[in-house]
Amino acid sequence: MSKSKDLGTRSIPQLLASQSIPAAIGFMVMTLNMVVDTIFVGQYIGKLAIGAISVVMPISFLMSSVGMAIGIGGSSIVSRAFGAKDQEKAQLTFNNQISLTLILITIILAGGYIFYEPIITLFGAQGDLFSFSESYYLITLLGIPFLSLAMMANNNLRAEGKPRVAMLILIIPSVVNMFMDWVLIVLFDMGIEGAAWATTLSNVAAGSFMIFYYLSGKTELRVTPSLFRLKKNIVNEITRLGLVSLMRQGSISLLTIVLNHSLFYYGNQAGIGGETAISIYAIPNRIAMFAFFPLIGLSQGFIPIAGFNYGAQSYKRVKEVVRLAIVWGLIIAGFLTLLLLLGSNFIPTIFANEQEVDLLHYAPQAIFVIFFATPVVIFQLIGSSYYQAIGKAMPALFLALTKQFFFLTPFVLIFPLFAGFEGIWYAFPAADIMSALICYYFLRIGMKKLDTKQINTETSLAN
């Protein structure tokens, strides 16, 4: 029996759990890998290495997010095609995703190597951070094609009802990275270059696993070279929906540029030092990636369920999964917030040794303030994911940009004018609250439209 059919028949709580838990575990291990990476460089190399990773990581994610964007946009089409029992469209969409990913990532990598100096400078590699950032960037760029393919495949595996395999794509490179961090940084004392090679090898492992799995014939979606030729209508739909994810990552990258330059400027103004200020933020940034893994897993598990049932015109099931995802998300996020606030003084000691006095002094306040409004982020995650799942690109794009682009980036520029260096931290909870209010409003509109569609469907069937 096709695993994708389960998305339209199993109970919603069982489905959401079976889709979200593997996704959450995968993201947990992936983000734990980032946390461990930061711990290794912080304990064995120093705060400049932490700052360098904070500068380069958003660039790597922006480049590789091309694969993620194509996968999210394409998997939305695949989910709805499976729901509508259109196998031909599902197969064509999957193979067009492969071609599109390879073409775009080749162009991006060429530009990334040619213009690497202005790129890393733009993202905040200033002063003593530049040489560390340069070394880390040039090496990690080698693994971007593999990471992009893995991200694309990850979304399609969930669309065909294989969340556990999708989880493995996230777990394998994380385990490889953590092991290679120990080997290359601790045993071989390779410094920042060792951290970069560990990351690159882990991305190669992720891409290689994806390639071998799809060639094994164990998937509903098959690699079919005759379907690689790009079809305009498919590419347009992938682009419209994938643009949501790409613009979201683009807004995060823009935020990183503004944030790193603001931290550098106001850190110097406060007498902390610009490089140190960037390294301070790197700690809550890494914690955010790790702490939010259950919420990201929940939103990723939600998408194929909502998309499949919307395609099958089972609108009551779509409403049920939206409501359940929000309730679960609020409970999980509330618990996470409590842990982060209570642990704000302890967390920095994990990343920095006792010589890094400034990091240990300033990071606790940053953690406490940044995560103060964490529970409400579930509205933005589910809001943008819902409209993406049902193929509505424009509202999905708008909601995806609410926090980073419309609120947090301008707040980071405005708040320090009145509150100085600490104003940067207060921008985060303010942006969380504002974006949550807007996303909640759009979700209510979406649910009312589902009620109308359900009535029309039942009337049509009765006639």
Image (cartoon, helix red, strand yellow):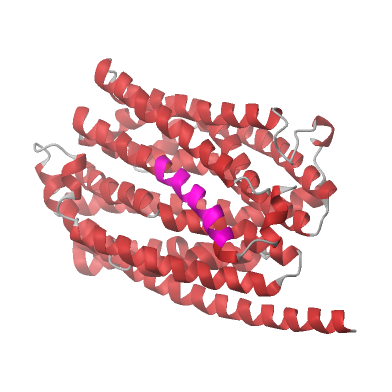
Looking at the rendering, in which quadrant would you find the C terminus? bottom right
Question: Image quarter for residue 458?
Answer: bottom right
- Rendered residue at 53%/73% (across/down): 323
Q: Nearer the viewer, residue 70 or 274?
A: 70
Instruction: Name the spot of residue 254 as percent of width and height, x first.
Output: 44, 52
26 part of magenta stretch: yes
Q: In percent of the image, x 68 and y 82: which residue is there?
A: 451
Q: Is residue 200 visible?
A: yes
Q: Is residue 463 above or below residue 81?
A: below
At 45% from the left and 67% from the top, the residue drawn is: 328
Residue at the image position 29 percent from the left and 63 percent from the top: 337
- Does residue 36 sit above or below 342 in this rendering? above
Determine which quarter of the picture holds residue 197: top left
The vertical placement of 337 against 246, above or below, is below
Image side of residue 31 versus residue 109, left or right: left
- Give coordinates of residue 102: x percent, y percent: 66, 33
Q: Which one is in front, 70 or 379?
A: 379
In this rendering, position of residue 75 left or right of residue 268: right
Q: Looking at the magenta stretch, what is its main secondary structure?
A: helix
Q: Residue 152 at x, y = what percent?
A: 62, 41
- Magenta range is 14-29
Closest to the observer, 268 or 35: 35
Vertical comparison of 184 with 414: above or below: above
Is residue 171 left or right of 364 when viewed as pictured? right
Residue 127 visible (yes or no):
no
Query: Does the segment drawn in magenta span residue 119?
Result: no
